[in-house]
Amino acid sequence: MKVVNKNEFETITRNGYALVDFYADWCGPCRALGPVLEELSKEYPNVSFIKVNVDEEEELAMRYRIMSIPAVFILKDGEVVESVVGARPKDAMKAVIDSALRK
């Protein structure tokens, strides 16, 4: 998964599906969720998986009203179609992604 800045974020999320993991390096649950999302990125080649560090990209964090992390948003053509806050097991994250892909 690639850590992106605001400009890259805009380009990647504009078209198609993108899963965005809002995280911070100091966040334990974020570190636990990272490998799960990395695994899932291999199972969903049609979804762009990216990470946004909330400490470095405060403007994006504010735009998406990130109050707790990890926060995962799934966007379709730049619009949020699903979101979940907190670390989840692989099966739960897979269900969130599958739900988003039906929208």
Image: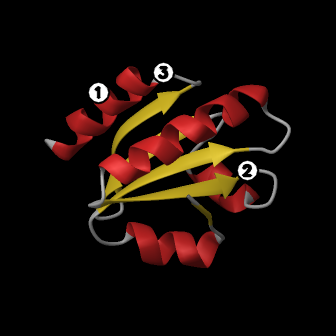
Q: Which residue is mark 1?
A: 95
Q: Nearer the viewer, residue 91 or 71?
A: 91
Type of colouring: secondary structure
Q: Amino acid at mark 2?
A: Val
Residue at label 3? 89
Q: CA distance from mark 3 to mark 1?
A: 10 Å
At mark 3, the secondary structure is loop
Q: How much space separates mark 2 and mark 3, taking CA atoms?
A: 22 Å
**Spot occupied by residue 62 in the image (x, y as percentages of width and height):** 66, 50
**Residue 54: which disc?**
2
The residue carrying pointer 2 sits among few (fewer than 14), some (14 to 19) or many (20 or more) residues within 10 Å by Cα, namely: some
**Mark 3 vs mark 1: which is more N-terminal?**
3
Compared to 8, does 35 lie above or below?
above
Which residue lies at the image location 56% right of the left edge and 46% below the top edge?
21
Note whether residue 68 is visible. Answer: no
Q: Residue at x 63, y 67 (%)?
A: 4
Crowd class of label 1 (few under 14; some 14 to 19; many from 20; radius 10 Å): few
| Mark 2–mark 1 CB contact (< 8 Å) | no
Height in image: 88 above or below 33? above
Q: Which residue is rendered at x = 66% and y = 29% of the image?
A: 32
Which residue does the image show at 43% across and 26% down from the upper left?
A: 90
